[in-house]
Image (cartoon, rainbow, N blue to C red):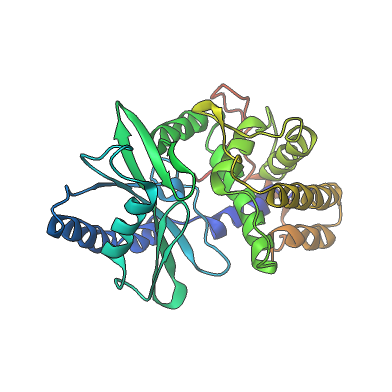
Amino acid sequence: MDFGKEFGAFYKVIRIDKEKRISLLSNKKALRTKIKNNFEKKDRTKPKFFIQGSMDTEVATGINPLNEDYDIDDGVYLQDINRQSITPETAHKWVYDAVDGHTKETKDKSKCVRVIYANNEKHVDLPIYVEEDGIYYLAIKGKGWIENNPKKISKWFQDERKAKGHDFRKAVRYLKAWKDKRENDNSNLELFGGFQLSILASDYFPDSYDNLEEMYFKLVDKINDNSWAYPSLDNPINSLQDTIEYYSEARIKTFKEEFSKMYEQAKDAYEETDSSKKHTKWTKIFGDRFPEPTDDENEAKSFETPLVIKGTTDISKTSGRQA
């Protein structure tokens, strides 16, 4: 038997729905206003903003985290500023000073200023950018201004979703759910970020499959076979940029080891024929949120994901898809 229906039900559990997203972003205006007002008082041009990453509506790969600490990225785009006139450290200080005290805690991290809300409901990361001649640069403390364009990444993701189908987004969320489970089990673990997982899902998305369980297994099988042929993980919008360039060797090694373990668990679960044992094996990867199987196999078939051929939009089966 396959677990296509169970994977479909699990997706509904982990995805951030529209209502939750609206709730999480409900007070972004207050934070932005605080930054603008502070800049204005200091006679600086008010910055512009852009919700990016998994909360970008065109990307929308955010998941409901097990620790309920939602991650929001709101890019701060400095105006009338260039890389020669300000260091990343100064840019961080400007934004940090503007938001410090807005919530219970503020942290100045290497790639962003983080605003942490009460009860750890969420945190807002504020990466800081400047633009020169149509090229955007991210302020990374200790590294300098590094070329980075979230808007182009958003467009790349849209194009990938159109080419591969809505299940591409599911693939990314499933990988994030595994990452979330492992990091929640072991707080010392730091696996690859969501962008890197999206690149892996794009590079190794299966050409065909009959259901979501098969899609996920084929994906992790291809990643496990091919992803470590080269040490880099190139940015899809800038092939000269390695997205794990600043990761430590220890972090890269840990990810490889953890992914290899997960692949072996996924292979065992995928090949299991007993439904109860199969469920137990998938929970080792995704946790107790993974739904228990039903006995109605005819009902399960009605939720099968259509066969997707990479690069086409041909659909040969009825589906209960939800993006």
Across and down, in percent, residue 247 comes to 62, 47
Count of labels shown? 0
Residue at 33% across, 53% down: 90
Residue at 60% across, 52% down: 176
Across and down, in percent, residue 16 comes to 47, 56
- Classify 254 as above or below 27: above
Pick whichever, 191 or 221, lies toward us: 191
Pick whichever, 96 or 165, lies toward us: 96
Side of 222 where 237 appears, left or right: left
Pick whichever, 131 or 306, lies toward us: 131
Pick whichever, 196 or 159, lies toward us: 196
- Classify 102 as above or below 198: below
Question: Is residue 320 among the parts visible in the rendering?
Answer: no
Across and down, in percent, residue 125 comes to 41, 57
Side of 133 where 268 appears, left or right: right
Location of residue 219 by image quarter: top right
Residue at 17% across, 50% down: 44
Side of 256 where 121 appears, left or right: left
Side of 172 where 57 appears, left or right: left
Question: Is residue 141 among the parts visible in the rendering?
Answer: yes
Across and down, in percent, residue 287 comes to 69, 64
